[in-house]
């Protein structure tokens, strides 16, 4: 999914702009705008993960940690110390970036199962810290009183306004990531995925790039966490557990790892499953997620976004 | 302009490489003069590819050093050595199968021209300009090696002979002063071998020093200015092709009982 | 009322540590069996333990079957689940890559967890201890009798497995598969069957672990993931693929966790094993008994 033309981008922007209005017009789905805010927040994370996993060929089973660090830094600094939320968001990004750098450097020397397990363990350790450091985080009961967001006096205090804020971030991250993919850096990432040996021999600093894309994906997750915190005005550790890291994997796998569109679509579908379709069937929730992941990995390895190519291969040769 | 025409661009100084108890390289000692084509030959298992891997930074030598333009490079990482001006191809082709022919060569330009992550992400004019430049450089090389018409084909779809040529082209994209070719003729038929040999000479004619490992003696005799012979990780002979051809030690190494 | 001396306290932590370490060792052994034959790391390994505990509870407490009958019945059920996992999640993958296999076993682990949640709900369940709950005084430490059952079953498992791999044809065939699957299939060994068998064995061992540990620490539907990660930590600590390594790694990991929880912080109990895992992966991924060149040559 390399050549992303102007038309899909404009369509994307157009859909974002009209969605809240459309949802408000059709009865029964007014609350979809609220659900789409979460879809947007998750998309922010999956876009970064898509670059990490689909393009650079790495894996992280611990990204909930970065989501949580962003949320807690924003939450703590705004609720406890009353600092400007945007500054705190930047602080969250910096802390998350630093953690990603420190943990990523040794982790990314690992491959395959070892990398997966190391990131998984890291994610759980951060989760334990959220639960244990009650003085800072409020422990398992969470912390409340996180203020909303406003800019120059304009408050994002309605669902519609927050929708545009979140999806504005998503759109920006999307464009930035498309630019990366279509540039030399994107080429370097794909080279790393294909043959680290040859990439090194051609002068690509393989470990440097792996860490760079890891930090990038962590930063996006951190922004998502901050946006989440300021929307719900309350956070608790349960949101940032291992199962969420796995849900992120499901989003990416379902949408298609090698496609940024897939990242957004996958996030959207799982979000609706989570908040809408499975809402009254909680006992089935986990089974459904497991089944989706299994079916995707066996029958749709390139996810939904890979269907056009799959069809081309099946029916293209005549 | 300067009198480095007789200077050694590469010096392999008594390099030792041991893997546990296995001694792969035991103090081969030779230099490569700037601007020549030098071949490393020897029976299977003589340590030729190991030597390449040491020179290009994939292995650190157990002892001894390698110097490039007078500077020791043995402690540098592979990508840093590429930055310094040494490029290479691989015995088993290591093209980027997930990219097109053009993109493979464009990646080769990485050490010479690249935009920063942020500049690329924000699509700054400087980044766009560099991307155009990279594409032009890559196309130039593709025209030089004769693959320009296949620039958008997936790299893996090319026949073997063209894949090897493409890998050489990618190695050229970094404008190296020394290019190390690991068995450029392996697996090629007569026509393809001829193309490869011509390309090697054409590269050399442009001033690039070539160091190659090769089994095909016709190619070696055809293109090389000098030859180094390895056996059991040691240098057993060095000199012009004619001397090597008649060297009794070399003949014995090849004929006297396999490795 | 006897006072526990500091030495006794330390010993207490240590005994608890090797008890819980025995569980990690059994999970690690399970990892190794599958890894040796297939080079796959089965993320669902912990779910076998969870299923062993919960199924045993259903048979013994729910249906009232005596221990003697419920034990083998549980093992059979969980073994079948393990075989199902191979047939439904692993073999169907047409072009196995590292990433797809990781995701497949993660998917399997979620499916098993979800099924367990559906059947048993989210509450923890208890199993009566095999020989009662009167604590035994053991060199100054106060030990639950069930602890000895756990350690005992580890020893039995190790002995049975060693005999299996070294003395039986089937076991030797599996070892051959682990060493060189191509050569093994050339001499007529059905590699696919060996893979199925490896999953079956791993599931069985996991089930045993789950059954013996439930009287101590209860069992609930989502215990699997943590057990899997720590079991993997034990396997890597001892050297992935090595049986003595798995046992020693498990015991050491359990001891570290128990001492850490007792002496440093009980809230961070789970973190100790995870930190050890990360350290081993960063600095000595071949583990105590592993061979570095071997771990590099392995396909993944």
Image (tube, coloured by chain):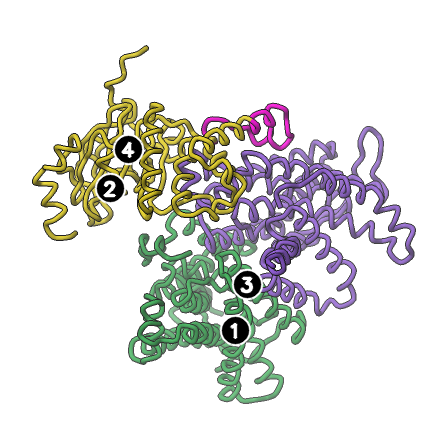
Chain colours: A purple, B yellow, C green
Secondary structure mostly seen in the magenta stretch: helix
Residue under mark 4: which chain is it in? Answer: B
Residue under mark 1: which chain is it in? Answer: C
Q: Which residue is labeled 2 in the image?
A: B48
Is residue B39 in the magenta section? no
Between the C-alphas of marks 1 and 3, the distance is 12 Å
Residue B211: mark: 4
Residue A248: x %, y % from top left: 63, 53
Taking B15 as reference, is C261 above or below it? Answer: below
Look at discs 4 and 3 and give the one toward the viewer: 4
Q: Residue at x 55, y 40 (%)?
A: A213
Residue B21: x %, y % from top left: 20, 49
Residue under mark 3: which chain is it in? Answer: C
Q: Which residue is labeled 3 in the image?
A: C104
Residue C87: mark: 1
Residue B87: mark: none
Q: Do circles 1 and 4 both sit on a common chain?
A: no
Who is closer to the viewer here, C250 or A165? A165
Q: Secondary structure at mark 4?
A: strand
Read off the magenta span. B110-132
Who is closer to the viewer here, C191 or A69? C191
Badge 3 local density, few (<14 within 10 Å), some, or many (20+)? Answer: many
């Amino acid at each position: 999914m390399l050549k992303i033309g102007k038309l899909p981008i404009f369509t994307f922007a157009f859909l974002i702009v009209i969605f809240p209005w459309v949802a408000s017009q059709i009865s029964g789905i007014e609350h979809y705008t609220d659900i789409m805010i979460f879809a947007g927040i998750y998309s922010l994370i999956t876009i970064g993960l898509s670059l990490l996993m689909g393009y650079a060929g790495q894996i992280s089973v611990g990204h909930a940690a970065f989501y949580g660090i962003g949320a807690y830094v924003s939450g703590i600094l705004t609720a406890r110390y009353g600092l400007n939320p945007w500054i705190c968001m930047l602080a969250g990004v910096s802390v998350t970036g630093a953690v990603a750098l420190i943990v990523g450097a040794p982790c990314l020397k690992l491959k395959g199962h070892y990398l997966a397990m190391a990131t998984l363990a890291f994610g759980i350790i951060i989760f334990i810290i959220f639960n244990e450091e009650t003085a800072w985080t409020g422990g398992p009961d969470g912390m409340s009183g996180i203020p909303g967001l406003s800019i120059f006096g304009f408050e994002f205090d309605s669902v519609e306004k927050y929708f545009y804020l979140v999806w504005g971030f998503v759109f920006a991250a999307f464009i930035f990531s498309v630019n990366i993919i279509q540039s030399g850096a994107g080429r370097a990432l794909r080279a790393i995925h294909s043959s680290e040996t040859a990439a090194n021999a051609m002068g690509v600093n393989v470990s440097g790039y792996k860490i760079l894309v890891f930090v990038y994906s962590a930063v996006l997750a951190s922004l998502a966490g901050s946006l989440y915190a300021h929307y719900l005005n309350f956070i608790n550790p349960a949101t940032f557990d291992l199962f969420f890291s796995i849900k992120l994997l499901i989003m990416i796998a379902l949408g298609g790892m090698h496609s940024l569109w897939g990242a957004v679509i996958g996030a959207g579908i799982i979000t609706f499953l989570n908040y809408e379709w499975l809402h009254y069937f909680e006992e089935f929730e986990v089974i459904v997620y497991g089944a989706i992941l299994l079916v995707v990995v066996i029958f749709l390895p390139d996810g939904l976004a890979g269907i056009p190519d799959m069809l081309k291969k099946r029916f293209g040769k005549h | 302009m300067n009198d480095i025409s007789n200077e050694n661009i590469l010096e392999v100084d008594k390099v030792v490489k041991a893997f546990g108890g296995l001694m792969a390289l035991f103090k081969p000692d030779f230099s490569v003069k700037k601007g020549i084509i030098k071949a490393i030959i020897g029976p299977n298992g003589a340590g030729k590819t190991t030597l390449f891997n040491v020179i290009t930074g994939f292995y650190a030598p157990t002892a001894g050093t390698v110097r490039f333009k007078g500077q020791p490079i043995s402690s540098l990482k592979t990508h840093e050595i590429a930055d310094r001006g040494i490029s290479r191809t691989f015995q088993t082709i290591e093209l980027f199968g997930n990219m097109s022919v053009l993109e493979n060569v464009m990646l080769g330009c990485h050490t010479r021209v690249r935009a920063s992550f942020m500049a690329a992400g924000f699509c700054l004019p400087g980044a766009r300009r560099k991307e155009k430049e990279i594409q032009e450089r890559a196309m130039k090389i593709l025209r030089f090696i004769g693959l320009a018409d296949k620039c958008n084909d997936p790299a893996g779809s090319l026949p073997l002979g063209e894949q090897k040529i493409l890998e050489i082209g990618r190695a050229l994209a970094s404008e190296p002063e020394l290019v190390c070719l690991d068995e450029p003729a392996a697996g090629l038929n007569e026509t393809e071998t001829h193309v490869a040999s011509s390309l090697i000479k054409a590269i050399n004619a442009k001033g690039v020093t070539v160091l190659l490992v090769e089994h095909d003696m016709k190619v070696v005799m055809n293109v090389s200015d000098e030859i180094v012979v390895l056996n059991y990780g040691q240098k057993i002979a060095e000199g012009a092709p004619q001397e090597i051809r008649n060297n009794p030690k070399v003949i014995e190494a090849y004929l006297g009982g396999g490795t | 009322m006897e006072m526990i001396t500091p030495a006794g306290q330390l010993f207490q932590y240590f005994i608890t540590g090797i008890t819980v370490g025995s569980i990690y060792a059994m999970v690690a052994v399970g990892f190794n069996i599958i890894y040796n034959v297939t080079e796959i790391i089965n993320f669902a390994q912990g779910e076998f333990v969870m299923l062993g505990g919960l199924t045993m509870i259903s048979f013994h407490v729910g249906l009232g079957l005596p221990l003697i009958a419920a034990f083998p019945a549980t093992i059979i059920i969980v073994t079948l689940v393990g075989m199902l996992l191979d047939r439904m999640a692993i073999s169907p993958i047409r072009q196995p890559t590292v990433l797809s296999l990781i995701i497949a076993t993660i998917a399997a682990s979620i499916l098993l967890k979800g099924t367990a949640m559906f059947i048993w709900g989210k509450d923890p369940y208890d199993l009566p201890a095999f020989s009662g709950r009167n604590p035994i005084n053991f060199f100054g430490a106060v030990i639950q009798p069930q602890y000895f059952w756990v350690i005992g079953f580890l020893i039995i498992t190790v002995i049975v497995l060693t005999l299996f791999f070294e003395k039986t044809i089937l076991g030797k065939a599996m070892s051959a598969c682990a060493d060189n699957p191509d050569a093994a299939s050339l001499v007529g060994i059905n590699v696919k069957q060996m893979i199925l068998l490896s999953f079956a064995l791993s599931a069985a061992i996991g089930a045993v672990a789950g059954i013996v540990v439930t009287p101590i620490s209860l069992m609930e539907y989502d215990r699997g993931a943590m057990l899997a990660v720590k079991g993997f930590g034990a396997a890597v600590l001892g050297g992935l693929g090595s049986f003595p390594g798995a046992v020693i790694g498990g015991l050491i990991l359990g001891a570290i966790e128990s001492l850490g929880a007792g002496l440093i912080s009980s809230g961070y109990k789970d973190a100790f094993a995870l930190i050890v895992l990360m350290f081993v992966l960063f600095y000595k991924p071949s583990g105590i008994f592993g061979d570095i060149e071997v771990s590099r040559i392995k396909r993944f």
